[in-house]
Image: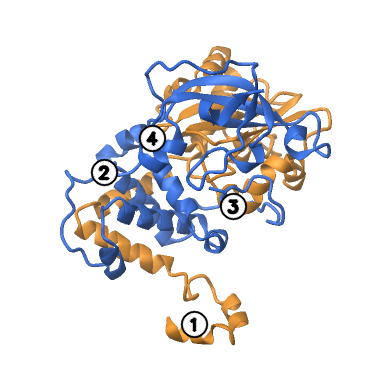
Amino acid sequence: MNGVHDMGGMHGMGPVEIEVNEPVFHAHWEKRVFATRLACAYHRRWNSDINRYAVERMPPVDYLEASYYEHVLFGLETVLVEQGVVTAEELASGRAAGKADVAGVLSIDGLDTLLQNRIRARRDEKVAPKFKAGDAVMARNINPAGHTRLPRYARRRRGVIDRDFGVYVFPDTNAMNRDPKPQHLYSVRFAARELWGNAASDRDSVYVNLWDDHLDPA
Amino acid sequence: MSSHDHHHHDHHHDDEHLSEHERPLSGPALRVKALESLLIDKGLVDSKTIDGIIETFETKIGPRNGARVVARAWTDPDYKKRLMTNSRAAIAEFGFYGYGEDMVVVENTPTVRNMVVCTLCSCYPWSVLGLPPVWYKSAPYRARAVIDPRGVLNELGAPAADDVDVRVWDSTAELRYMVLPERPAGTDGWSEEQLAAIVTRDAMIGVAVVTVPEGSK
């Protein structure tokens, strides 16, 4: 979706300010919501693409005002209800209408395994690649209302395949209808001048990870 | 709520002076507390596990892991070769696993500077750097890293010379990038531990260079 989350190239956001000796978390609730979301991932009721699409649907003014962990909270509340894990009434009242139908909960001993297998985007099946390193490509001009990992700044821009990472789940469909649509994932190099015009340095480039369904030969 | 709405226009400016906790529309602390207890009641999460996850991310996972990887790559050419060709496996040699994501290490040289960003969300290499700092997840960096990387580097005190290529890696897939910084001059003969101690998080994101702090060695 053409949302405010797709920030690459925007102006007016202010300076980058690095906090010296920044703590891992800044508030107690940040810790709790981060860890709660991870513990919920154990039940595999959604995938990381569904979760990202939930965060992207936060109303744009709220999204820009909110901190990262408020995004996390919004996304978690959204997927819990949309995936039928809790009801909207339970979320609003804070009272459980009954136990969830799940086989156990994450224990701390299971954390390493959960972390290692949490995403699993790479696939073993053989799918023919549409491109190879060195091929000239153009990113498609798509503007889906749903989830996509093709940022606006790269659409309809010409690039070169830098490398082929093999077969991966395609997030655009995996988020919308759980269709993993496995296909090749590439790193595509775009010259900074192709993206931003001649004011950019002719030495610079931006590498974007894109899938077969994002690309046409150029 | 209704009294807040009623007063909203008259006291708009007062709202701006309230802290995040006091602002009526943002009660994340309350919402998180209610959500956690609901999920415990429903049998979906365990509060001891939540404590343990927090402790893990506060004490065991963080940029010191990445610094050890960098220091080994600087001192062991065979390791560096493995790191550059199969990053996830080479990182796993330390017991740091790519957390379900694959890893790609990109190398800085005298003529190439690499910078990592996630313009669409906040993807970050947890296994080597831990959880991302606020600035990495914030709008200014996500917006500017791709269009004005040299401006960002200048502001952060790590400018790239005109004859250096700047390569920005936008993490749009389940692949996480880490920068292998250049080893600073004056560190010949240093041990892996000594080298790891000077490698910073920001250098592994690509917005700083590794330097030898005064008085170190």
Q: Nearer the viewer, mark 1 or mark 4?
A: 1
What secondary structure is marked by label 1? helix
Q: Is residue A69 visible?
A: yes
Q: Say which amino acid is labelled 4.
A: Ile
Q: Say which amino acid is labelled 2.
A: His
- Between the C-alphas of marks 1 and 3, the distance is 29 Å
Q: Are marks 4 and 2 on the same chain?
A: yes
- Disc 1 is attached to a residue of which chain? B
* Residue A119 numbered tag: 4
* Residue B5 numbered tag: 1
| Percent coordinates x, y for residue B81 in the rendering | 56, 14
The quadrant holding residue B61 is top left
Q: Which chain is orange?
A: B
Q: Residue at x 31, y 37 (%)?
A: A114
Q: Is residue B162 left or right of residue A215?
A: right
Q: Quadrant of the C terminus of chain B?
A: top right
- Disc 3 is attached to a residue of which chain? B
Q: Is residue A38 left or right of residue B137?
A: left
Residue at which label 3 appears: B138
* Along the viewing direction, whichever of A139 and B15 lies nearer the viewer: A139
